[in-house]
Amino acid sequence: MKRVKIISAKNVVLEDFVAEDPKADQVRLRVMHCGICGSDIHAYFDEHPFIKLPAIPGHECSAIVEGLGESVTNLKIGQQVTFIPQLTCGRCYNCRNGRYNICDDLKVIGAQADGAMSELFNVDARLVLPMPESVDLKEAALVEPLAVAVHATKLAGNILGENVLILGAGTIGLFLTQVAKMAGASNVVVTDLFDFRLDLAARLGADHLINQKQTALTKNELRKMLGGGDIGVVFEAVGAEQTIRQAIELPRKGGKVLVVGVFGQESKVNMGLVQDREITIQGSLMYLREDFVDAISFLSRRSVNTSPIITNTYNAEDAPEAFSTAATSKGNCVKVLISFSK
């Protein structure tokens, strides 16, 4: 069997491995498609604060059930599925209170535990969720990042009628655009550095676009766009000092900032604005099971469009090129998939 491994910075290989039989409570999956996400790119550069190399990536996956452990009865061979890549302790305060996404001992498949970027992968059956046959297997690989957007939007609370600013038009930012509109946002403003991504944001429902290479992102500029209105909610989906500073500077007094981007380095921000303007800053990590279920429902109902977001697909043997593309071609690609299907 073959699987992808990040050996060291910018060093990706396709290696051989021996697939083990699933344990009693596990499912053997034949992986069909696996996405490269922002966290994988941080790991590719050996800059992720919580991933140590070498590592086997892969937490955005679609798969077909190929084998069942002896105690698994809720799934069947040949079923189309995805899985939730969270390994939690079940004992800590947050696990006991339903916030297991911030478990004290959280491990993420593809980060602190071996990932599924491989031909075969065994995973706990409790983490596996069936996918409707109506959902294309490539689309199914994007349930995980869509669930990130669903979770962050829920954390923002009631955004009905709010003006929303999304910093970053990558995969998460483009899903946030669609989910925020579904949640009733009045205007969604999306920023990025590349027109290609901003054009996608417009196709997916953004009301206003700002290319920060061409236009300064200021309160006055936003007010002109919004007919005098202010931003109520900001989603930071980049993970950079410049954008988190903007996220704090730009909302109205009493506004909210949702931090969704992964930060590889510490950032300096103006906390005086947070205090003086009573700005709420909320971190958003991953998702809960219900967010995954909602994401699957959105895909099956065609409430969310994934097709424009998948810009590149590579066969597994071309994994090094796939990672290089995802890491360096930000202007003309968004989601890169690695395909193990024949």
Image: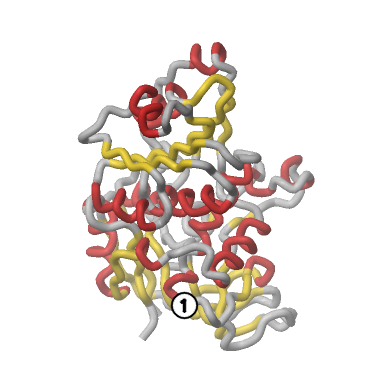
Name the foreground residue: 268 vs 96.
268
**Residue lying at 27% horizontally and 74% vertically, measured from the top left:** 317
Relative vertical location of residue 105 with respect to residue 309 in this rendering, above or below: above
Task: Locate residue 298, reporting x and y percent.
Answer: 57, 64
Crowding around mark 1 (Cα neighbors within 10 Å: few <14, some 14 to 19, many 20+) is some
Left or right placement of residue 328 versus residue 19 in this view: left
Residue 313: image quadrant is: bottom left
Name the foreground residue: 205 vs 130.
205
For mark 1, give the secondary structure.
Answer: loop
Residue 78: image quadrant is: bottom right
Quarter holding the N terminus is bottom left
Task: Locate residue 117, reporting x and y percent.
Answer: 42, 68
Q: Amino acid at mark 1?
A: Asp
Q: Which residue position holds label 1? A: 136
Asked if residue 107 can be seen in this view, the reply is no
Task: Locate residue 229, reporting x and y percent.
Answer: 47, 28
Left or right placement of residue 118 versus residue 277 in this view: left
**Residue lying at 33% horizontally and 45% vertically, measured from the top left:** 46
